């Protein structure tokens, strides 16, 4: 009996320690395990100012400048806007908010995805679309408005293609010009500190050549939207194109009408082209 008592006490102590260990293990298992980071929870892509791109670095266009660009082009719900180098999508989204259909062409796929996300957040993804593409290869044929925030050298490379668009197509640029093609309108916003100038051009009809107006010969030369020449032996003055609309003065009479290919028609007058100029200044 004396020998049994120590053994019994040892067994009881062992049992109690096993119970305590089991309870401790259950407590450890009950503690919440910290969640592991998932690749799916990465932060959304955000661009950085001056990050390199294919043709230019990315710099955001201030909203006041976007507003001026759209105001100068007089954008309406009937327009189809194409933004070349659309970046974060601000111009396309702003045009869509005004009811226009708009498409951005952007080479960086991350920027395309960002712009698509922002268009969805703005509730205009049905009118604002974005595609990955090269701005020099984009199909501009459906556009009634083109917007740009590119370098002057890029604008000059695009200029021949822009001048081949349908007369009346409006082009707006943030800050940078089109060389010797002077803008039809421009505006500067005081609500921003940089990149605040908007410029706008209207693609002019091609009128250079020889026309028959009544019993007289009308000879026209053209420097983009500026028209000069003679009607008979009289020099014309104040010749101007606004898309397909033409005005000029000759012999004290002002002629105002519209160009439709090889014909021009206005109140009380019409002219038909008899020969086109082989080349025309301002029409590369």
Image: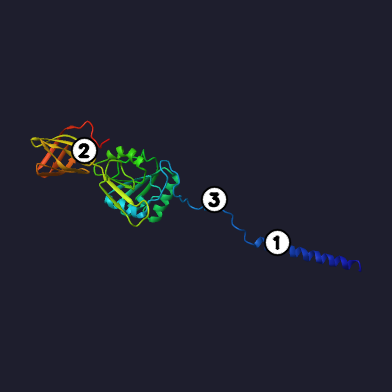
Looking at the rendered structure, the number of numbered marks drawn on it comes to: 3
9 and 135: which is toward the camera: 135
Q: Which mark is residue 39?
A: 3
| Callout in the foreground (3, 2) | 2
Residue density around tag 1, few if under 14, some if 14–19, many if 20 or more, within 10 Å: few
Residue density around tag 2, few if under 14, some if 14–19, many if 20 or more, within 10 Å: many
Residue 158 position, x and y percent, is 33, 39
| Callout in the foreground (1, 2) | 2
Q: Would residue 235 be found to the left or right of residue 110 on screen?
A: left
Q: Which mark is residue 25?
A: 1
Residue 56 position, x and y percent, is 41, 43
| Callout in the foreground (1, 3) | 3
**Element on which disc 3 rests:** helix
Say whether disc 1 or disc 3 marks the residue closer to the N-terminus: 1
Q: Indicate the colouring scheme.
A: rainbow
**For mark 2, what is the residue?**
222
**Element on which disc 2 rests:** strand
Name the residue: 31% across, 39% down: 159
Quadrant of the image containing the C terminus: top left
Q: Which mark is residue 208?
A: none
Whether residue 76 is visible: no
284 and 116: which is toward the camera: 284
Residue density around tag 3, few if under 14, some if 14–19, many if 20 or more, within 10 Å: few
186 and 265: which is toward the camera: 186
């Amino acid at each position: 009996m004396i020998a049994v008592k120590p053994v019994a006490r040892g067994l009881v102590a062992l049992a109690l320690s096993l119970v305590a260990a089991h309870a401790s293990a259950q407590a450890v298992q009950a503690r919440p395990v910290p969640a592991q980071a998932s690749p799916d929870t990465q932060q959304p892509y955000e661009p950085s100012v001056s990050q390199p791109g294919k043709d230019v670095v990315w710099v955001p266009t201030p909203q006041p400048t976007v507003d001026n660009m759209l105001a100068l082009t007089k954008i309406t719900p009937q327009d189809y806007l194409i933004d070349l180098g659309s970046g974060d999508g601000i111009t396309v989204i702003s045009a869509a908010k005004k009811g226009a259909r708009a498409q951005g062409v952007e080479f960086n796929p991350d920027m395309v995805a960002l712009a698509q996300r922002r268009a969805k957040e703005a509730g205009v993804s049905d009118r604002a679309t974005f595609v990955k593409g090269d701005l020099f290869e984009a199909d501009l044929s459906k556009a009634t408005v083109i917007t740009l925030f590119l370098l002057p050298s890029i604008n000059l490379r695009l200029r021949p293609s822009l001048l081949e668009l349908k007369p009346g197509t409006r082009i707006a640029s943030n800050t940078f010009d089109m060389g010797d093609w002077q803008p039809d309108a421009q505006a500067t916003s005081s609500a921003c500190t940089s990149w605040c100038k908007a410029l706008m051009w209207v693609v002019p009809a091609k009128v250079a050549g020889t026309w028959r107006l009544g019993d007289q010969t009308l000879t026209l030369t053209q420097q983009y939207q500026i028209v000069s020449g003679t009607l008979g032996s009289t020099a014309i003055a104040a010749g101007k194109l606004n898309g397909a609309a033409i005005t000029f003065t000759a012999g004290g009479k002002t002629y105002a009408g519209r160009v439709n290919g090889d014909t021009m028609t206005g109140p009380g007058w019409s002219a038909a082209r008899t020969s086109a100029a082989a080349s025309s200044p301002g029409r590369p």
